[in-house]
Amino acid sequence: MNTIYPIINHVKCDGDAACTIVCPNNVFSLRKITDEEYNQLPFVGKLKTKIKGRNKSFVTDPESCIGCNLCVTNCHEKAITLSL
C-alpha cells in the first residue's frame, strides 16, 4: 500500500496543469470545478479562480504516486505537497 500521496491546495492552484504533464504515473487530472467546490473556496480563492478560469488539478489516482516530487517542484503556485 502506498504511504505517500499528493495534496492540492485549491486556493493556490491556478489550473495550469504542470502536475498533469510532469507526473510519470498520471496521478492528476485537470477539470473545471463545480459550483459547489467553487462556493467552498474562501474569497481569495474565488477571486483567483474567477480570474484564472475554473480549471483546477485534482488527485485522481493517489495510489499510483511514487513520491518523485516532480509535481511539487514544477508547480509554480506551490499548491502541491506530499503527505505521508
Image (spheres, grey):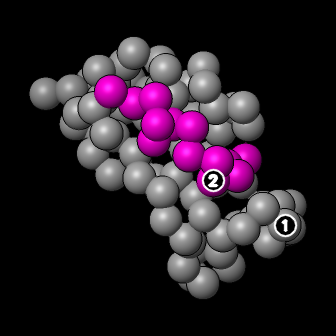
What predominant SS class does the magenta segment belong to? loop
Magenta region includes residue 64? no
Check the image and report above or below for 41 versus 60. below
Check the image and report above or below for 56 versus 39. above
Q: Under tag 2, what secondary structure? A: loop
| Image position, residue 65 (x, y; %) | 30, 29
Residue beneath disc 1: 51
Callout 1 amino acid? Ile
The answer to whether marks 1 and 2 mark residues whose Cβ atoms lie closer than 8 Å is no
Magenta region, residue range: 12-24
**Residue in the picture at 40% in, 30% down:** 23
Give the quarter of the figure containing the N terminus: top left
Check the image and report above or below for 83 versus 32. above
Callout 2 amino acid? Gly
| Image position, residue 18 (x, y; %) | 57, 37
Residue 46 visible? The answer is no
Q: Which mark is residue 15?
A: 2
Residue 69 horizontal side relative to residue 63, left or right: right
Check the image and report above or below for 57 versus 41. above
